[in-house]
Amino acid sequence: MIPINLWEHQNVIKTLYSRCVEQVCEKHKITRMDLDILLFLANNPAFDTATDIIEVRYLSKSQVSSSIKLLEQKGYLKKEYREGNRKTAHLKIQEGAEIIISDGRRAQADFFRIMFWGLGTEELEQMKQCHLHILENIHRYMKEGKDDV
């Protein structure tokens, strides 16, 4: 019997996700990081800076910077600056990236369909609430170094 400890199964979940999105990357000749950035920006419009991506997704600054530069060169992203602040670049998805995002979202939907097959609405809602609580605990600890439990 397989042990029921989700933390021990993180790699198989990551592997499933990679398998679901790899065809999108191959089709559009982009890296997994490139796709992750485009999908993050598309799915989280309030988080539109490189710093947001790094802090929310816990990705390395150098990898995010490299991918953003490549995505800009390919015309998929554009940096925009708000009036009065030439320091913070806001990343805007360009029209050419829409098909990639559409394909990526389809791959994400396949991933979720496979992972959550057979679970009911109530079970999914309970899982979501538990996951949010766990994430809040992790973020609080990572930010403050406190584990007030």
Image (spheres, helix red, strand yellow):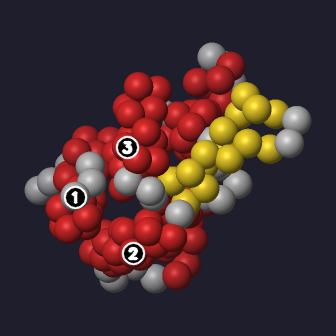
- Indicate the amino acid at tag 1: Lys
Q: Is residue 76 visible?
A: yes
The mark found on residue 99 in the picture is: 2
The mark found on residue 19 in the picture is: none
Residue 77 in picture, x, y percent from top left: 51, 53
Q: Is residue 135 left or right of residue 72?
A: right
**Residue in front for this viewpoint, 16 or 1:** 16
Q: Furthest residue to the top? A: 145
Q: Marks 2 and 3, how far apart in space?
A: 17 Å
- Indicate the amino acid at tag 3: Leu
Q: Marks 1 and 2, how far apart in space?
A: 13 Å
- Local SS, label 1: loop
Q: Furthest residue to the left? A: 1
Vertical order, 146 against 111 (above or below) = above
Vertical order, 35 against 140 (above or below) = below
Can you tell which quarter of the image residue 75 is in? bottom left
Q: Marks 3 and 1, how far apart in space?
A: 12 Å
Q: Earlier in the sequence, mark 3 or mark 1?
A: 1
**Residue in front for this viewpoint, 46 or 2:** 46
Q: Residue at position x 25%, y 64% from top?
A: 28
- Local SS, label 2: helix
Q: Is residue 14 visible?
A: no
Q: Which residue is mark 3?
A: 70
- Indicate the amino acid at tag 2: Ile
Q: Residue at position x 86%, y 42% from top?
A: 83
Q: Is residue 75 left or right of residue 87?
A: left
Residue 14 in picture, x, y percent from top left: 26, 51
Q: Which residue is mark 1?
A: 29
- Local SS, label 3: helix
